[in-house]
Amino acid sequence: MEWKDLFTIALGAVLVNNFIVAQFLGICPFMGVSKKIETASGMGLAVIFVMGLASAICWPINTFILMPLGLGFMQTVTYILVIASLVQFIEMFLKKAMPSLYEALGVYLPLITTNCAVLGVVLQNTQNSYNFIESVVYGVTGGIGFLLVIVIFASIRERMEFSECPKAFEGFPIALMSAGLVALAFMGFSGLKVFG
Amino acid sequence: MNVKNQLRDGLFFQNPVTVQLLGMCSVMAITTTLFNGLGMGVSVLVILTLANIIISILRKIIPNNIRIACFIVVIAGFVTIVDLCLQAFLPDLSSSLGLFIPLIVVNCIILGRAEAFAYKNGPAASALDGIFQGLGYTMVLVIMCVVRELLGNGTFGGGLLNGGEGIRIIPEGIPALGMILPVGGFLTLACVIAAMQYILNKPKKDEKKTEEVAK
């Protein structure tokens, strides 16, 4: 394994195959908490944290427990349980150890359980048969990509509050439209090859 | 709770996608051919109905504090069953839906209905709720598929009709490829929701007018 491979994975996760705009993972929190930049960045940070940790924990579970026992079909159930308990655990740990961080992430942590980007990154790690370091890098950089897009989108939405649009498009549809434009902009990265 | 109201809520007034705004990841990601859309819609319908029934039967046993975890385990069980069935009987569909079948676990529609309906109502009503909400979801998926496939690929019924290639309506080279790419997903869903809001807001105005006239 070379640093080049890791760099390619990282670049792919942040820009080319961005979780939100290219793979449609984690749309619900993306639309739900992107009304203000502060909440959006809070959510983004929490997602980076959980995605990295979930990748790091699910890899040994899959490699050392599920695979040797031939329980590959239990992956989905196992992963979601790991993620749910991980989120719960992080919440309790932060509350005790780092109250300031807990208050910053507070509301967003429980929401992450149902964020498909987290389950998605873990399942993709298994599908692409990444090793431990690659999994963690993919998880963390995928989270960074999430943070990037959600902050861009939140700043667009803050400005959109004051503009007028047709009545039927008010609220959610117009937000989806602008998300579409962000996705269009990110399509520009699709030809990006660094070591190709 | 009568059946007619539940059906109308599921399809229109409380449609899981266009009104409750749940489960949008899969709606935008897999609606590129009619076959994908129908397959995904039916899978969700089956899982939603079964999960609703089980959760509503167990609702008196499940402790309030850990109910979310219990819901997720029930849902994940059914998702695994459906996933394995698809891999065995419809391998094409399974490979084209890929990641989004296991991701039904975290589809907010199912968790949302479990929390909002099945945990509070009996098994029969919950089963009906699952079927109707699933139908509402499938309806939106099919609309999205037809629009995106027609504009992006120029065909109708891809994966199902004409040996899997679909019936060509717009000649090759003309369709806008962008409609099949992520951009098209966002734009089409925006238009579908806008159309739904427009239609749903109309009768209310009429009602208000008649009320005013009556006064």
Image: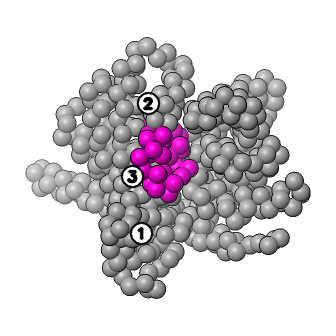
Snapshot quadrant of residue B120: top left
Residue A164 counted in the magenta span = no
Pointers 1 and 2 in contact (C-beta within 8 Å): no
Identity of the residue drawn at 76% across and 26% down: A93
Report in which chain the residue with disc 1 lies: B
Residue B108, image x, y percentages: 48, 41
Residue type at mark 3? Gly
Report in which chain the residue with disc 2 lies: B
* Residue furthest right as drawn: A3
Residue B109 counted in the magenta span = yes
Residue type at mark 2? Glu
In-image side of B17 versus A10 (left or right): left
Q: Quadrant of the N terminus of chain B?
A: top left
Q: Which residue matches tag 1?
A: B148
Main secondary structure along the magenta-highlighted residues? helix
Q: Which residue matches tag 3?
A: B39
Q: Which mark is residue B115?
A: 2
Q: CA distance from mark 1 to mark 2?
A: 32 Å
